[in-house]
Amino acid sequence: METWNQTSDDFILLGLFPSNQTGLLLLFLIIFIFFLASVGNSAMIHLIRLDPRLHTPMYFLLSQLSLMDLMYISTTVPKMAFNFLSGQKGISFLGCGVQSFFFLTMACSEGLLLSSMAYDRYVAICHPLHYPIRMSKMMCVKMILGSWILGSINSLAHTVYALHLPYCRSRAINHFFCDVPAMLPLACIDTWVYEYMVFVSTSLFLLFPFLGITASYGRVLFAVYHMRSKEGRKKAFTTCSTHLTVVTFYYAPFVYTYLRPRNLRSPAEDKILAVFYTILTPMLNPIIYSLRNKEVLGAMTREFGIFFAKKQ
């Protein structure tokens, strides 16, 4: 393996699980989660596209979240499963760059999109009379395009820098995908400047949006508490608690991983935390948003009803 490292530009992904029966069982569990995430997010996109009652800014943003989650989990799991089942651990230099680019794009774009979703709920509950103006269709499109464009630009900058680093040590990445921080220890130059830029980037795309979301929901919960309508208070609280659950599952492990100094991080812990935001969150999002949302459940009933009627 060492000879191969010295004569090839390709990388080796050490993977998430050991190459034994236990690892195989865990991989099948991950594949099952991948299947649930793919079906759940595809169904959510399909429902929001077909049902006119879901053609609102909140569900338009939610459909984009499902699209990002679908691309997110597809960036890491298929390659990890192929490497484990085939017994190969290699990933080409170009393949590593493509995987890193799409992973970082989805990570940053989803962080910004969740902020937009929090702003949508803040305006809907705290400023309902201004909602049609502040959350117009054009504003919704701008939020979505902004999330994709800013995420892509940030991702491209990090990916290009990481691929231009000289790697004179082992090319074995101790991770299950090409995560840039996991690649830095392999470089033969001091990367402290770039690590500082990772800190700044994480703060801009993850930490600050998370703090903004927390502050906005503090204001929202205060407004919900003072609502006169019991039914309205219950509906608003259910919607907000659902979004807060998704936000916590996504931001907490991400921020904890990327804001820690390298000397306080361990590859094993980083890989376990990465499972939360790359695999579990894309699977949980459609479940959380569907099971705790009467409008989505109603859309599912209507669409399935149409489906069965056509079948009969």
Image (spheres, grey):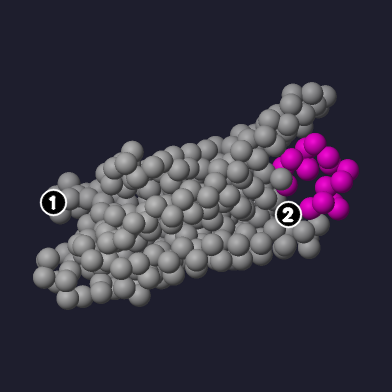
Chain-order first, disc 2 or disc 1:
1
Residue 187 position within the rendered picture, expressed as x and y whole percent measured from the top left: 29, 61
Residue 274 position within the rendered picture, expressed as x and y whole percent measured from the top left: 38, 48
Q: Camera-side residue: 101 or 117?
A: 101
Give the amino acid at mark 1. Answer: Asn
Q: Is residue 37 magenta?
A: no
Can the viewer see residue 195 in this picture? Answer: yes
Residue occupying the point 25% across, 74% down = 9
Which residue is the site of mark 1? 20
44 with respect to 184 (left or right): right
Q: Camera-side residue: 189 or 98?
A: 189
Residue 29 position within the rendered picture, expressed as x and y whole percent measured from the top left: 30, 49
Residue occupying the point 21% across, 62% down = 169
Residue occupying the point 55% across, 43% down = 207
State the quadrant of the C terminus: bottom right
| Cα distance between the residues tagged 2 and 1 | 47 Å
Binning the other alpha carbons within 10 Å of mark 2 as few (below 14), some (14 to 19) or many (20 upward) gives: many
Give the amino acid at mark 2. Answer: Pro
Magenta residues span 120-135
Residue 186 position within the rendered picture, expressed as x and y whole percent measured from the top left: 27, 59
Disc 2 on helix, strand or loop? helix
84 with respect to 290 (left or right): left
- Name the disc covering residue 57, or none: 2
184 with respect to 130 (left or right): left
Residue 193, above or below 239: below
